[in-house]
Amino acid sequence: MLTLEEALEMVLSSARQLGSERVDLAVALNRILAEDVTSDIDVPPFDRSAMDGYACRRTDLASELLVVETIRAGCAPRETVGPNQCSKIMTGAVVPQGADCVIMKEYTDAPRESAVRFVGDKTADNICLKGEDIGAGEVVLRGGTRIRPQHIATLATVGCTHPLVSEQPKVGILSTGDELVKPDEKPGYSQIRESNSHQLSAQIGQIGGMARNYGIVPDHRQDTDKALREAMAENDVVILSGGVSAGDYDFVPDVMTQIGINVLFRKIAIKPGKPTVFGVWDDVYCFGLPGNPVSSFVVFELLVKPFMYRLMGHDYRPPRVRVSLATKVSRRKTERRSWIPVVIMDDLRAEPVEYHGSADIRALADAHGLISLDIGVAEIPEGTTVWVVLI
């Protein structure tokens, strides 16, 4: 049975990067850049005033300064600043020739009309120099970057209105189980509502994938075979939930093998999520996840999400914070790495939520993240500093 680290290395090394496409900047959020982006201009493109004030020569600060013009943002200066002269200037406007500093309006008075005097003790230059933020031709974003709102602003600034991004993975989702009914149906005796496909679709959409739900598949070999083949023909990745454990009707691993999928592993030493299957067939990847919703959620976050990002050329690291544990956490069996949902309290301590096992999806709804107990560790004492993987 593989450790999580071994399984993660196996799936990541199996991933091939997808193709690329250009998209409008308006829909580029959360996409992955497929190339480096360089600037076509200097930023700022000219020496610009950082303040509302007066542009002048530093050597003239002790003198009365004659105002020769007013410069608004977006307008070019008409005059050169000479000895004992200044130009009234607005924030963002072009600094006129001859001036080497801008004195803030708040530190001046007007001894007479069209004249000002600096009344402060000292001043910074208050000038943003041409190209000091970004030089023309400079790389501003690297390929593999996940585009966030601040990156949108950067792309707009350097004129990249149609960035080249990785294609979105197409992911087929199948939920197996005779006990499953749709969420809009009231379960009968021995039935439960199917939630995994909706949870997985949301997780996939959140990272820029394109999910397609193939519905509920009965626990029969023929049905599983047919549904899996259909999904494989239409997607880059197929995720099945349920049917992967050791029961009489857990057909998924065997069906994957019969189809010709090269199954690389069938178990991982984690809890929840032990019966996790991964295989590759040509250019399609198949994951078999446990049927319990907490298990499928956790395995997706820890294993499938990094894999999908790798398909898009992005090296994903889950966000996490380091806090102290508010309550002792203990367990009896230590042969697997356990993941436990927690909340982060106002005093920045982690408190385990009430958790009844891998079917208890309510526990995840209340949780901020997950902590783990490594293989062989039976207890984490109160007050211990732990990493919380945010969810």
Image (cartoon, grey):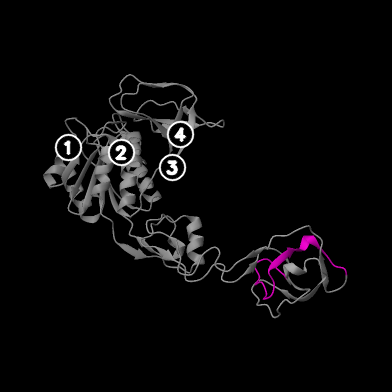
Give the CA distance from mark 1 to mark 2. Answer: 19 Å
Q: Which residue is mark 1?
A: 251
Residue 309: x percent and y percent? 34, 50
Q: Nearer the viewer, residue 129 or 254?
A: 129
Disc 1 or 4, which lies upstream in sequence? 1
Q: Name the mark on residue 319.
A: 3
Q: Is residue 128 above or below residue 200?
A: below
How crowded is the residue under tag 2: few (<14 C-alpha within 10 Å), some, or many (20+)? Answer: some
Judge left or right: residue 179 versus residue 70: left
Q: Are marks 2 and 3 in contact (CB under 8 Å)?
A: no
What are the residue bounds of the magenta stretch?
Answer: 89-111
Amino acid identity at mark 2: Val
Q: Residue furthest right?
A: 112
Secondary structure at badge 2 equals strand
Q: CA distance from mark 4 to mark 3?
A: 15 Å
As for residue 102 lying within the magenta part, the answer is yes
Q: Is residue 40 left or right of residue 379?
A: right
Res. 26 in view: yes
Gap between marks 3 and 1, in whole Å? 35 Å
Label ID, residue 367: 4
**Residue to which mark 2 is pinned:** 181
**Figure quadrant of residue 101:** bottom right
